[in-house]
Image (cartoon, helix red, strand yellow):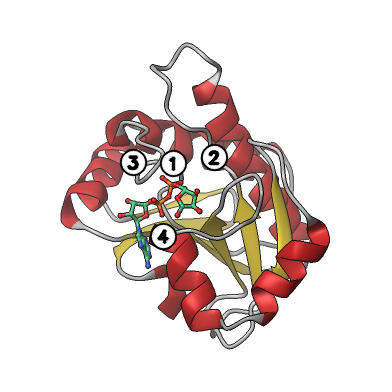
Amino acid sequence: MERRTFGSTTLELVRGDITEQEVDAIVNAANARLAGGGGVDGAIHRRGGPSIMEECRKIGGCPTGSAVATGAGRLPARHVIHAVGPVWRGGTHGEDEQLASAYRRSLELADELGARTVAFPSLSTGAYRFPVDRAARIALGAVRAWLESAPTRIELVRFVLFDEATLDAYRRALAELGD
Ligand code: APR
């Protein structure tokens, strides 16, 4: 299953590269120092150019489970929302709640910015080693709950998954969400 509607918002799953998304806001898998890195973070700063890091330096940091917004430099998106997911430490250190919170806060920020289309990567499932099946259930559950909790101007939430195994995990989680 690749697409479902929650409230008046479409949630869809695609395989692809987050930096190529022509949406109002893309979400970065950032760290708490907003210091850049590899994976999604490296790709966004590389393709977006130095203005994004300049803004990150001014902001200074962001706690785990939260998010901050900058411009998108040379990327096709208008905003980058830097979300900080948890590092996986076995699942007993509040990681599930921190991950859900990173998604919720990103959606809140996107809505405040007036974004109608938002693209997420799979937060925390790369360098931060969060198990992907569990992360996919939390991600889609948190986004669904948020979309159904209040009216929003967001029309499209797209999960952009980099590899087939991750896309498959999100497909399974979307099918399991229930009605
Ligand atoms: N587009 C979409 N997804 C991508 C891209 C891309 N261009 N590049 C990598 N991914 C995928 C990875 O394959 C993984 O499935 O995004 C998922 C998240 O991986 P990471 O980017 O490593 O993010 P995370 O696990 O949250 O780790 C964050 O890594 O790069 C550092 O600075 C970052 O310290 C932070 C940490």
* CA distance separating discs 3 and 4: 28 Å
Query: Measured from the top left, where is residue 99 in percent x and y?
Result: 53, 34
Q: Determine which of the numbered discs, if any, sits on residue 124 in the image.
A: 1
Q: Which mark is residue 85?
A: 2
| Between discs 1 and 2, the one toward the N terminus | 2
**Mark 1 Cα within 10 Å, few/some/many (few <14, many 20+)?**
many
> Helix, strand, or loop for circle 2?
loop
**Residue picked out by circle 3:** 174
Helix, strand or loop at label 1? It is: loop
Q: Quick check: marks 4 and 1 in contact, CB under 8 Å?
A: no
Q: Is residue 21 visible?
A: no
Amino acid beneath label 4: Gly
The reply to whether dot 1 and dot 2 touch (C-beta < 8 Å) is yes
Tell me which amino acid carries mark 2.
Gly
Name the residue nearer the viewer: 171 or 84: 84
Q: Quadrant of residue 111?
A: bottom right
Residue that badge 4 annotates: 38
Q: Residue at x 36, y 38 (%)?
A: 136
